[in-house]
């Protein structure tokens, strides 16, 4: 699945990832030695192969069969201080922002991230939450929400992904969290802040899964406690991305977006209805929601 963005503001320069003291300035060989991915004799072989050529250390190591592509990606992640997922990771392959950070889809996502930072997240301390909405089912809300949250965490923003789709939640599957307490349990007082899960493989990213599916999701999300929860989470996180149910089937999406203050719409080529998207946009604006733009999946 590819990702493109439309109806958002014009392209702007992408943010540059920060470097850490542990990775900045360190050589590939040193990083891989410390991680026990290479032996000293292997480093010498690679450096000998490099002499008289302009081949990079990683390319030379792969040519000699001493390094894998995953080894190279690991060393780069340490050098440039960003998180990625290795091929043997148990998280869903749909998380392309972490598995394939050099892909075109990830580049489009970073451009979208930059625009959202300028239009919403950098414009006030109270603007920390963003709802990901779409009119119908199967249009990619959960997919976009998860990858966008990863993209913000890669920027070094403390990021929380909330699964507020209390009808057909998916984030617990994407992040391999299993059945556990989550948002619904917090809203009725059955769970506390420990329901938020730090994703160890992806620094600066936490996930609050949907939790037990309740019989009254609209009522739970419409209560003041949900607004209070978002406000309290805003004290601990820089960015809060909220997954929502399909708007044409449930009114929960409007409620969540109103609590967040802003929404990003998702459509899918060959599946989404333009009249339904227009109706959703109008409805959200009537709720006082700032509609920041739309994203088109499957371009």
Image (spheres, rainbow, N blue to C red):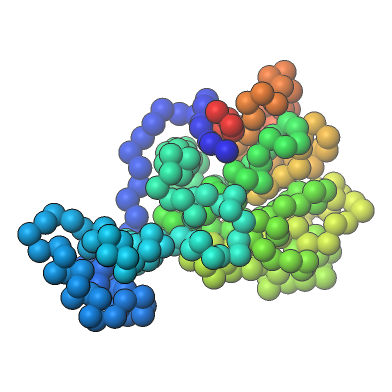
Please say whether residue 131 is visible from this viewpoint.
Answer: no
For this view, does 34 lie left or right of residue 176?
left
For this view, does 46 lie left or right of residue 226?
left
Write the residue at 72% across / 37% down.
138
> Would you identify the image quadrant in which residue 114 lies?
top left
Residue 62 rendering spot, x and y as whole percentages: 30, 61
Counting labels gives 0
Write the residue at 56% across / 65% down.
89
For this view, does 67 lie left or right of residue 7?
left
Write the residue at 51% across / 61% down.
87
Residue reaching furthest to the left: 52
Residue 82 to residue 8: above or below: below
Write the residue at 25% across / 76% down.
42
Residue 299 rendering spot, x and y as whole percentages: 55, 28
> Would you identify the image quadrant in which residue 258 lies?
top right
Residue reaching furthest to the top: 275
Residue 26 to residue 266: above or below: below
Residue 18 to residue 140: above or below: below
Residue reaching furthest to the right: 215
Please say whether residue 192 is visible from this viewpoint.
Answer: yes
Residue 98 rendering spot, x and y as whole percentages: 49, 55
Q: Quadrant of the N terminus?
A: top right
């Amino acid at each position: 699945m590819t990702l493109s963005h439309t109806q958002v503001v014009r392209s702007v320069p992408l943010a540059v990832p920060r470097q850490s003291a542990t990775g900045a300035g360190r050589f590939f060989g040193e990083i891989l030695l410390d991680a026990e991915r290479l032996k000293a004799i292997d480093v010498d072989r690679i450096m000998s192969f490099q002499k008289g050529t302009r081949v990079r250390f990683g390319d030379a190591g792969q040519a000699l069969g001493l390094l894998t592509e995953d080894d190279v990606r690991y060393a780069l992640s340490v050098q440039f201080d960003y998180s990625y997922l290795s091929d043997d990771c148990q998280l869903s392959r749909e998380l392309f922002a972490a598995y394939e950070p050099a892909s075109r889809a990830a580049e489009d996502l970073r451009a979208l991230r930059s625009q959202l930072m300028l239009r919403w997240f950098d414009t006030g301390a109270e603007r920390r939450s963003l709802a990901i909405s779409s009119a119908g089912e199967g249009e990619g809300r959960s997919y976009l929400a998860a990858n966008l949250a990863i993209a913000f965490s890669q920027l070094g923003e403390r990021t929380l992904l909330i699964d507020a789709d209390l009808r057909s939640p998916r984030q617990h599957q994407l992040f391999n969290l299993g059945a556990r307490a989550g948002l619904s349990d917090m809203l009725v007082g059955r769970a506390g802040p420990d329901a938020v899960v730090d994703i160890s493989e992806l620094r600066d990213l936490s996930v609050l899964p949907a939790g037990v599916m309740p019989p009254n999701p609209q009522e739970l999300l419409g209560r003041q406690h949900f607004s209070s929860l978002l406000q309290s989470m805003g004290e601990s996180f820089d960015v809060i991305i909220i997954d929502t149910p399909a708007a044409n089937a449930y009114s929960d999406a409007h409620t969540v977006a109103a609590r967040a203050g802003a929404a990003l719409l998702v459509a899918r080529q060959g599946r989404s209805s333009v009249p339904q998207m227009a109706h959703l946009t109008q409805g959200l604006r009537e709720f006082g929601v700032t509609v920041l733009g739309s994203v088109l999946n499957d371009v």
